[in-house]
Image: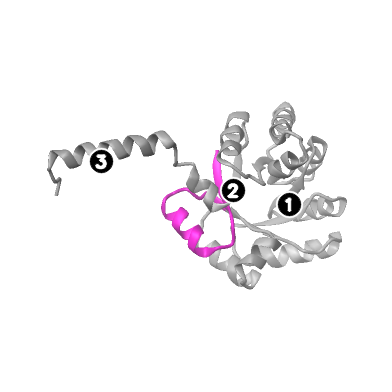
């Protein structure tokens, strides 16, 4: 499963990229606001760091304007993925932009039927929002499983990009049910390395080592 990092913070992206933990980046208007940066400037900087897909989201709501914004964003770098909302106008824009050879990430997906439409419109990625489904007492992993089955049944190339990841448990479950990609905040990716038994074992090793009175260097 590929790891995308869901942020527009350069420091976090660079650190995780240096560790080989970043296969791509996703941004959205809320993350751009949080960064306090100009969208074109910060997105270009991200693309200079990361070789994989970098999702930059349009803010228009009508198809023609989405297409125009998508083309503008795609000029930033070759690895830009134009991010579009899963609306009828978003699907229209997806069809045009994907037909032009641009990568497209269709976001805010909450049903298997929506995912089916996005695939037929030529989406490179479909982004089902796991956490937001969990927030209303629905199991987001059921949606991932349904999309996986449908895409496999018909040979769609659209990649399932699990989004709205809130916990390390979400990451494990996405990997188990066959998501192609997951995107998560930097803090969730870092937490994947932690376990209380690891901490306990390391603490004991350090105590025992201190008793030997030895040094390696």
Q: Which residue is mark 2?
A: 184
Relative side of 41 to 113, left or right = left
Q: Are marks 3 and 2 in contact (CB under 8 Å)?
A: no
Q: Is residue 118 visible?
A: yes
Q: Which residue is mark 1?
A: 98
In the rendering, at what x and y percent does residue 30 appear? 69, 62
- What segment is highlighted magenta in the picture? 1-24
**Residue count near mark 1 (Cα–Cα under 10 Å), binned few <14, some 14–19, many ≥20:** some
Relative side of 110 to 46, left or right = right
Question: Residue, x 70% and y 63% (percent of image)?
Answer: 29
In the rendering, at what x and y percent does residue 83 appear? 71, 55
- Quadrant of the image occupied by residue 56: bottom right
Q: Nearer the viewer, mark 3 or mark 2?
A: 3
Question: Residue, x 78% and y 66% (percent of image)?
Answer: 68
Q: Nearer the viewer, mark 3 or mark 1?
A: 3
Q: Secondary structure at mark 2?
A: strand
Q: Secondary structure at mark 1?
A: helix
Question: Residue, x 58% and y 67% (percent of image)?
Answer: 44
Q: Is residue 128 visible?
A: no
Relative side of 42 to 209, left or right = right
């Amino acid at each position: 499963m590929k790891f995308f990092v869901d942020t527009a913070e350069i420091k976090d992206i660079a650190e995780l990229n240096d560790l080989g933990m970043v296969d791509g980046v996703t941004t959205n208007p809320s993350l751009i606001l949080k960064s306090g940066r100009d969208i074109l400037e910060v997105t270009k900087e991200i693309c200079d760091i990361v070789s994989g897909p970098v999702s930059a989201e349009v803010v228009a709501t009508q198809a023609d304007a989405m297409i125009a914004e998508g083309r503008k964003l795609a000029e930033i770098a070759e690895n830009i993925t134009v991010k579009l909302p899963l609306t009828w106008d978003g699907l229209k824009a997806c069809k045009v932009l994907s037909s032009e050879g641009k990568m497209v990430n269709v976001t805010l997906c909450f049903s298997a039927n929506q995912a089916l439409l996005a695939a037929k419109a030529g989406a490179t990625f479909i982004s089902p929002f796991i956490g937001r489904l969990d927030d209303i007492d629905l199991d987001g992993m059921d949606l991932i499983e349904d999309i996986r089955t449908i895409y496999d049944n018909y040979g769609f190339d659209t990649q399932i990009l699990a989004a709205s990841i809130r916990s390390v448990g979400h990451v494990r479950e996405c990997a188990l049910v066959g998501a192609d990609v997951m995107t998560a905040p930097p803090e969730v990716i870092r937490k994947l390395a932690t376990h209380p038994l690891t901490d306990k074992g390391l603490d004991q090793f350090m105590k025992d080592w201190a008793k030997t009175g030895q040094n390696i260097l």
